[in-house]
Image (cartoon, rainbow, N blue to C red):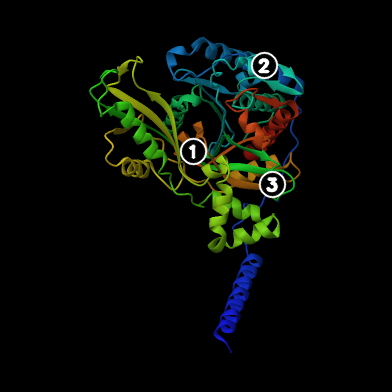
Amino acid sequence: MSMIRKVIIAAGALVCVLAAIIAIRTAMFNPEPTANIDGIKIDPVPKVDIATAAMRLGRIIQFKTISHQDPSENQTEEWSNQQRWLELTYPTVAKTMHREIVGVGTLIYSWEGSDPALPAIILMAHQDVVPIEAGSEKAWKYPPFSGQIADDAIWGRGALDDKGSLIALFESLEALAKSGFSPRRTIYLVSGHDEEVGGSGAQAAAKLLESRGVKAQFTLDEGGAVSSEVPSINGPVIMIGVAEKGYATLRVAARTQGGHSSMPSHDLAAVNLAKAIVAINDHPFRSELRPPVSSFLALMALQSDVKTRMAIANRWLFEGAIVNKMASTAPGAAMLHTTIAPTMLSASPKENVLPQIASALINYRIAPWQTSSDIMKQTREAVGGIPVELNWNAPPHEPSPVSSWQSEGWKFIHASIASEFQGAPAYPVLVLGTTDSRYFKNISKDTYRIFPTLLKSSDSNLVHGNNEHIEINNFGRAIAIYERLIVTATK
């Protein structure tokens, strides 16, 4: 037998063995499932007048509770007016639940349960919104603070982020209180006033509740959504955030002598800063498949086509291809690593003056498997000998813990949402942004993040973007889901 023939036979045998291994692993693929919700009973809940609720959402959008980067630009009376309006608009909530204002304007509503031994539940939605980008008003179909009801939707800044959720919670609590419902668990509604600029209000609220010994079964905040666009899966999928990335902003500063622009030296602050930014950006963090992202992919694969299931079941062979496929889109890439985003630059006050200090802010969203110390270490290595200073602009927020998808809290949330979406499956996901819920990790057993509405992938452009709106029927679903969740989790 010739050598070439032996090699061909050996190669064929190797391919057969490899194919057998792939087939066996695909057939035996059985990742840890999410908690079974078959035993969760969803009781009927009061009906809410959705047209009236939509009008109320439109009205609260008109309050310009805009959190500017410079707090001196905030119209603080808008928060007071909005909070007064909530008290008048939801009188049964005002009578049934105890209200406290923490700090500048964060709200804590509490509805005492009949069994104080049971851990509470904490529901969250923030009051503030981001500004409209200067000059973008004409790009809006309807004025951004009009709260216009048109085209079967409610339009304006905050409709999705996060006044839609806030009003849906108030509508559900008002309806339940009117119906005579009495919870066994204590219910807290926490509404931060400054989530868009760091959430100091929610942080103060969490510390206050912790000082009182409050323990919660779960906290629920914004973050995930229901999607019908998950690849290879027909029908809606409930995407519940079980973790969120950390948040840190680095200040990079270059210092030189400065002087007149007609006599530039070889040591320029702006040039050194530019070199440092490029060096940092050119040393990205490694993309990795880790929980909860890897867990999401594994669970998704169970309902996907054979090709997808085969790839996920054999990560030892196909992980590189999976990572490359995910990294082909910005959201997919962000799931896999800590992101680096240079955002703000500052240098000379005048065009013919060489700056003595040139600085930049670089925003990092830290993956759950890393810390701010890891980020700083790699950044210093990337900069090397470039003469710049590296300092955190503010104390970093580390990534959140990863919450369980086996808990009672998960079951309650999944079952309540699935009752509105034909028994849709629920998957754990990583939330790329930050939420006020991160401050409640010391008092809450688990923290989950989802605004229970059906959103398209293109809807993500509406959050902090032009033409933000929510469809009325979608908003109505959220109200019904919150009602069912409150009843199911606290009865």
Q: Is residue 74 above or below residue 360?
A: above
Distance between the alpha carbons at the discs numbered 3 and 1:
23 Å
What's the amino acid at mark 3?
Ile
Q: Earlier in the sequence, mark 3 or mark 1?
A: 3
Distance between the alpha carbons at the discs numbered 3 and 2:
37 Å
Residue at figure coordinates x 55%, y 49% from the top left: 293
Camera-nearest residue between 281 and 428: 281
Residues marked 1 and 2 touching at CB (< 8 Å): no
Task: Give x and y (percent) for residue 286.
Answer: 45, 49
**In the current view of this chain or complex, which residue is farthest to the front?**
262
What numbered label is drawn on residue 195? none
Task: Give x and y (percent) for residue 442.
Answer: 44, 39
Residue at figure coordinates x 64%, y 61% from the top left: 310
Camera-nearest residue between 366 and 180: 366
What numbered label is drawn on residue 215? 1
Camera-nearest residue between 419 and 397: 397
